[in-house]
Image: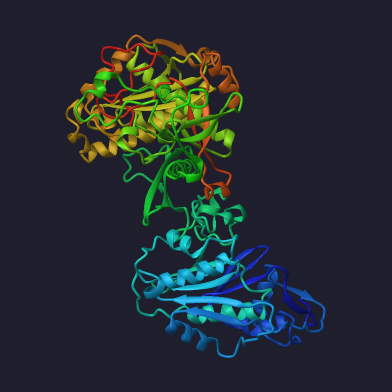
Amino acid sequence: MAAQAEVRFAAGVRLLSLPQGGTISCTRGHFAIDETSRAALWRALPSWAGSEPQLPCGDPTMIDALVGVGVLEACAALSPVPLPAPAPVVVRGSVALTALLERAMGDAAPLDPASSRRVLAVACDGADREATADISRHWYGAGEAHWIYAQLAHEVSVMARLVPDETLCFDCLCRRLDIPATTTAVPDAALGLPALARNLWLESVYPQLATHASIVVTRNGVSTPHVALAVPECVACRQSLKHASPRILPLRDVYVPDEAAPLADAETGVLREVAVYHPADDQQPSFPSCASARLLLPLPDGGSATIRGEGKGVTAADAVHGAIGEGIERYAASLWPADRLRRAVFRPEHAFDPRWLVLYEEEQYAQPGFPFARFDPDARLSWTWGRWLDDDSLVWVPALATWLDFPVAASERFAQVTSSGLATGSSYEDAALRAVYELIERDAFMRFWMSRTHPVRLLDVDIDEPVRRALHAIERQGAQVEVHVLEDASGHATVLCAGYGDGQRWPGLTVGLGTHASLTVAVRKAVLEHSHYGLYMQRLMREGRHHAVREAADVRSNLDHGLWYVDPARQIAMRARTRHAAAESMIHAARRFTHDATLRGSTTALARTGIRVAAVDVTPADIAVTPYRVVRAFAPFLQPVHFGFRMERRVNPRVTWRDDAWTPHPLA
C-alpha cells in the first residue's frame, strides 16, 4: 500500500464487540479478532470511519491484513465526513445492571433530545427475566430494534440485537437456547456489560458500522456469536422467517452442507450436531459410511425434545446429508401449525377416507387393551389440507395420520402412525417423489410378507464398487446375502436385501429395502440400507438387547421386530417366503422397469393400477428458509407397515392374507 494512501472502512462493514475480542463482517465473510486487535480497531474508528483527519494509527501489519480481506480500502486523501449528533441511549431493566451499564458508557453517548433516533437496551439478571421480556415484547411490537443483555441459567448469558420482522424475538431466543422460564441469578452477571456498552456507543456514534442483528452467547466465560431462527408458531416474530439469512455460521463442521447452514448452530440452531461414525475395531465393517444428526425441537409448553436422524452413504458427506434429511423429516412431522387444522366430520366428496389407510378387523378391536378405536364417520376429527398429485385438486386428510404424535382423544385414534410416506427432499417435488417411493416400498414388502406375492431372486447384483464393498463387508461377518425384487404392479422396482447370520457374529436375519424407477438405484439403496441397519442390529445383539424379546407377544416396538430375528431359528419365516423364488439376471430384470424417475412418472404409473396419491407439504417455516421440503404422502389401500404383535392392518381389498400373516415382520 502506498505510503501516502489513506484507508477507510469499506461499504457494508459491520463491527461487533464481544466480552473477549470481537467480530468483523464484510462482503467477504466474518472474521474473529482478539481483544488487542479489537481495542486497536476501536481507537482507529474516528480516522477509518472518516470523521477525523487521517492520523497514524494501527499496526501496519493489521492494516494490510484488513485491506487484504476487504474490511479497509485504500483511498486518496479525503476531507473528514461530519457525523450526526450521537443518538441517545435508553437503558431499561435491572436497576443494578442498568447502573453498571450507564457507568461503563460514561459520557460516550450523551443524551440528545433533538435526535431523530435512539439506541435501546434492556439488561437483566435471572431474577427479573419476565420483566425484561415484557420490555422487549413492547419494543419489538412497536417496531423498534433494541439490544438485550440477559443473565440466564447454567452460567449462560446472552447479548443480542433484535430487529422486528428481521430477527426472532426474545421469547423465541430463550426457547432456542432451551433455557427454562424460571431461572436464578448467578455470579458475574455483569461480565458482558462492557462489551454491550461498546456496542451501544458504536451504534450511537457510528451507526453505519454497528452490527445490524446479532446474538452472542457467553457460556462459562467463553463468548461466541450465533444465529437463531424464530419458532414457527410464534405470532410475534414468525414473519422474520421470510427474511432469514445466515450472517455468522458457528457450526462450521466440514460435513454440514451449504443448504443446511441457516439451521446449523450448536447453541441456538435447529441442527445442533453432526457426527460421523467410525468402526470401534478392525473387525467391524467400515462401509458404508454412517452418520447421525441431532436437532432440537422447542416444545409449545416449554422445554425441548431431541430429534435424531441417521444416514448412510458411499461417503461420509453422503451419510451426513442423509442424517440431516431424516432429522429434518422428523422435526417437521412434530410441528403442526394451528392455522392448518380444521375440526369437522368426514365428508367423502372432499376428504381422504381414513379407511383407505387400511384399518383393523373386528376381532382386533375386541382384544382387551387394543390401543386403537373404530373409525366413526360421524365423529368430528382434526383435518389438514393436501393436494392430489395427479390434478392438484384440494383434499382434506386426517391430521392424526399426517404428523407424528399428533394429540387426539382416545376415541379419535383410529390407527397407528409411523414415518411411512414421510420424506425430505431438496424441493417439494423431490420430497413428494421420495414419499411416494416409500409408500410403494412398504406396500410391496408388507404384501410380500403377509400375502402370497412372488419375489424374484437377482443374480450378479455387485453392480458397482459401492454395492460390491457393502456386500463383501457383510459376508466377511459370516452372513449370507440374498437380493430379491418384490412384486409390484405399478412398474416400480422394490428390492429386498436379506442377510442371514448365525446369531453370534451376525444376527439371524437382517433386511434392507429400496424403491426406485431404476432397478440399479433400488438395488444400491437396498444394499446400503441393509448394511446400515444390519450393523446397528449387530451392535444391539452384542449388547444382549434381544434377550428381552423371547416370544412373539414381546414384539411391541419397531425395534423389537429386528431383535426378534437375532435368533437364527426364526430365519425360517423369510426362507419360506423366498424358497420358490425364480432367479433372474440384473440385465433381464431391469427391462421391466421403464418409466421416468419423476413425480409425474410415478403418479402416472400408479394411476394405471387405479391408485391416486395425495400429498401434504408439512415443511415448517423455519425449515422453509432452506431448500429442504418435507412431504407426507397418502395412497388408498397401499399396505402400510405396522409395529407390534397382532397390530397388522388387514382390511385391504387388494390383499389376500397368508395363514401366517401374523408372524412378526423383520422391518425395524
Task: Tell me where residue 103 appears, x and y as whole percent.
Answer: 51, 89
Q: Residue furthest bottom?
A: 107
Please report the residue visible at 35 percent of the width from the left and 17 percent of the height from the top: 651
Task: Tell me where residue 43 appears, x and y as whole percent.
Answer: 63, 85
Q: Is residue 238 left or right of residue 354?
A: right
Q: Which residue lies furthest to the front in this view?
A: 378
Occupied quadrant, residue 605: top right
15 or 429: which is nearer to us?
Answer: 429
Quadrant in which the N terminus appears: bottom right
Occupied quadrant, residue 576: top left
Q: By what rule are the colours in the image chosen?
A: rainbow
Residue 660, above or below 543: above
Q: In this view, does 234 lie to the left or right of 357?
A: right
Residue 377, above or below 405: above
Task: Tell me where residue 219 appears, x and y as whole percent.
Answer: 41, 70
Residue 52, above or below 377: below
Number of labelled discs?
A: 0
Occupied quadrant, residue 106: bottom right
551 or 304: which is nearer to us?
Answer: 304
Quadrant in which the C terminus appears: top left
Residue 77 seen anywhere in this rendered image of the structure: yes
Task: Tell me where residue 626 appears, x and y as whole percent.
Answer: 57, 48
Q: Is residue 603 left or right of residue 287?
A: right
Please report the residue visible at 57 percent of the width from the left and 34 percent of the height from the top: 430
